[in-house]
Amino acid sequence: MSAFSMFVDTLRLASDDGDRSGRIHCDWEVLSATGHLVRSSAAIEVAPTSGLGDPRRFTHVAVVGGLLRAGDPLDAASIDFLRRAAAAGVPLIGVCTGSFILAAAGLLRGRRACVSWYHFHDFRDRFPDVKVIADRLFFVDGDRITCSGGAGAADLAAHLVERHLGRGPREKALQVLQVDRARPASAPQPRAPLSMEAEDERIRRVLLLMDQSIAEPLSISGLAKAAGLSTRQMERLFAESFTASPAAIYMQIRLEAARWLLINTDRAIAEIGGATGFSNPSHFSRRFRDAFGLTPTAIRNTPPPTEDILA
C-alpha cells in the first residue's frame, strides 16, 4: 500500500496546480483483467479503473507487488498484457515486489533489477539469471525500471515527473508530500547491516554491498570503487565510523550471517561456511571461534535461552 500510494500520489500532485487533483499534466489507471477489487496485505481493497486493453496507450506500465507467496501473483491475461507492452517498447516498472512479477514473466532477463535489501536474497535465489542490486532506491535499465519500494516509490515517481514535466512539478509534488528533497536513483537504501550506523552515504552503500556479497566476498578495492572512493578514503571513513578496517567489518558481517544460519536453519555446517564465503572449513571454524568463543558445532548444539512468558 505504501509503494502504491506514494507512487500514485506523487503523480497526482504533479498533474495539476495547487492541490486540486486534476489530471491535467499526467494521468493514470488501475488496471485489471477481471475488474475485481484488489485486496492488499493490509486488507484494504483497491478498485480497478480500467481493463487491460492496448498497452500502447500508456507511456509506462507499473507493477506494484504485494506479499511474496507461492503460486502465480497475476492471472495469465495480465502476464500476456505485460509481455505485449514489452514487445511494443512500453517501459515496464517493477515497484517493490513487482520486480518479482516481471522477473517471473521473463521480462528482466539480462537486466539489472533493484529490490529492497529485505528481499535481496529471495530474489537472487529465485532468479539467478537477473543481476540483482539492493544498494540504491531504484534503477533505470533502459525500458525496465525497478524500485525498492516504500518511500522510494515517491522518488521514482518524482524522477519520471521531472523527465516528462520538468523540475517544477517534481518539487511541488514532493513539497506537498513533505519530502524534504528528491533522492536520486543512486541514493542508498536507508538500512545498515548489523544495526551499524553511518552518516556518510558512501559508507552505507559499502555496508549494503558487503551484506549482499557474503557468499562471494568482493575485494576491498572493488568495494571502494563501487562507492566512488579510493581504498585509502574508505579505510579512513571506516576508522572514523567504526574504529575498525573495512576488512574487519566485512568479516564481522559474514560471521554474523553464518551464526544466524547455524541457529535458524538445518543446513550443513560446511554448506553454511561456503554460503558465507569460507571455502576452507578449518578456516571458517577458526574464524568463528575467534569471534564468538565457540565453534560452529558448539553454537548449533547450544539450546536457545528460555524466554519468560507474560500472561
Image (tube, rainbow, N blue to C red):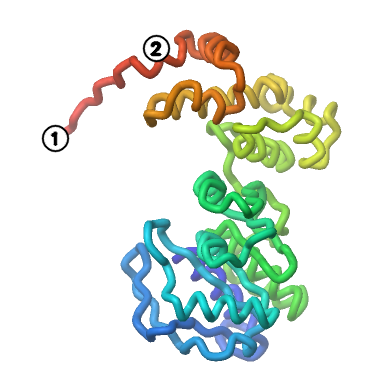
Q: Residue 12's x, y, as percent? A: 58, 80
Q: Residue 123's x, y, as percent? A: 53, 51
Residue 255 or residue 155, whichever sits in front: 255
Residue 286 placement, left or right of 309: right
Figure check: 60 above or below 133? below
Dot 2: element? helix
Residue 40 placement, left or right of 285: left
Residue 91 or residue 130, whichever sits in front: 130
Residue 160 or residue 258, whichever sits in front: 258
Residue 214 placement, left or right of 203: left
Q: Which residue is mark 2?
A: 298
Q: Residue 93's x, y, as percent? A: 61, 69
Label 1–label 2 contact, CB within 8 A:
no
Q: Which residue is mark 1?
A: 311
Point 46% across, 11% down: residue: 295
Point 25% across, 25% down: residue: 307
Q: Is residue 286 visible?
A: yes
**The quadrant where residue 152 appears:** bottom right
How far apart marks 1 and 2 lie (CA) works out to 33 Å
Point 74% across, 79% down: residue: 164
Q: For the residue marked with disc 1, what is the amino acid?
A: Ala
Residue 241 placement, left or right of 289: right
Q: Is residue 118 visible?
A: no
Figure check: 99 above or below 223? below
Q: For the residue marked with disc 2, what is the amino acid?
A: Ala
Residue 95 or residue 237, whichever sits in front: 95
Figure check: 87 above or below 193? below
Dot 1: element? loop
Point 57% across, 43% down: residue: 191
Q: Which mark is residue 25?
A: none
